[in-house]
Image: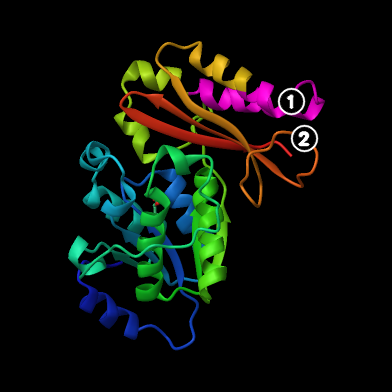
Amino acid sequence: MIICSKLADFERAMCQLPKDCEIGFVPTMGALHNGHVSLVKKALKRTKYVIVSIFVNPTQFNNPMDLEKYPRTLEEDCNKLEQAGAYLVFAPGTHEIYPDTHSKQFDLGGLDKYGEGPSRPGHFNGVAQVVTRLFDIVKPTFAVFGQKDFQQLAIIKHLVQSLGYNTQIVTGNTVREKDGLAMSSRNMLLTKEQREAAPLIYKTLRKASAMAAQNLCSPNELCKWVIEQIDSNPLLETEYAQILDGSSLVLATSWQGHKELQLCVAVNAKPVRLIDNIKIK
Ligand code: PAF
């Protein structure tokens, strides 16, 4: 497996690839877990030229403490990627990704109005900055993103279409621990007690999904119920529980008029913030 941290080395390595080969891309911020590995394996089903980037992108952190605490495990990450069969790891420094200013503003098509948008001002613009920059560098045929970041996935699909990128966006399923907790690099920051409490999040989402199927209450009532359930554990505090339209990502106030609906939550196990979602229609 090739490892590059300098843009020039990366470009040199990419020049060695066979002409017209498919390039699969998995952008990450490192601290890799089996969820990331599953994205790499998904990409490897289609091409052996799977590039993984590891870059903790400062522009998508609206909280400096969160950026500072974000786990960095480059050596372990490279071992996992080598074992998974990745072709190349690109782990650039900030100046390689942002040589000059990184103040570019993106039109996110209003997809950041709910969910993570209001809770993390500037977050999705930062994601747009880094993903477009990485796409410009890697020029992937396809890129794989996890469904756990449901809103990020929708925003990236929108950007690719609106900016005319020639990259196909492929979705990887959320990978869960045995007890249902969605795998996340942030899970390693949980205390033992918080880790034991955290499976309640997905357990509640599953129950809510069953309730939605029975049409027993309104979307708003269901979200209130979700918050009550999760917050019944004193170690968890729900920041939001929202049912969003699967394509426009607007808040659903009724079950009617939406082809697809996704229940999305953000939960604080302080200072760690966890997100998860489930398809309910
Ligand atoms: O999902 C992530 O890990 C990040 O948001 C991404 C897509 C790698 C951009 O920094």
Residue under the image location 49 percent in, 46 percent down: 149
Residue 99 disc label? none
Q: Which residues are magenta?
A: 199-223
Residue under the image location 52 percent in, 18 percent down: 230
Quarter of image, res 188: top left
Answer left or right for 190 relative to 8: right
Q: Is residue 216 magenta?
A: yes
Residue 178 horizontal side relative to residue 129, left or right: right
Q: Could you give the CA–CA distance between mark 1 and mark 2, rounded to whole angstroms?
A: 7 Å
Q: Is residue 46 visible?
A: no
- In this rendering, does residue 249 appear at all? yes
Q: Secondary structure at mark 2?
A: loop
Tell me which amino acid carries mark 2: Trp
Provide the residue designation for mark 1. 218
Residue at 48% over, 62% down? 107
Q: Amino acid at mark 1?
A: Ser
Q: Main secondary structure of the magenta part?
A: helix
Question: What crowding class fits label 1: few (fewer than 14 Cα within 10 Å), some (14-19), or many (20 or more)?
Answer: some
Q: Who is closer to the viewer here, 114 or 225?
A: 114
Could you say which disc has been placed on residue 255 in the image?
A: 2
Relative height, residue 75 to residue 209 (above, below) = below
Query: Horizontal and vertical percent for residue 162?
Result: 55, 70
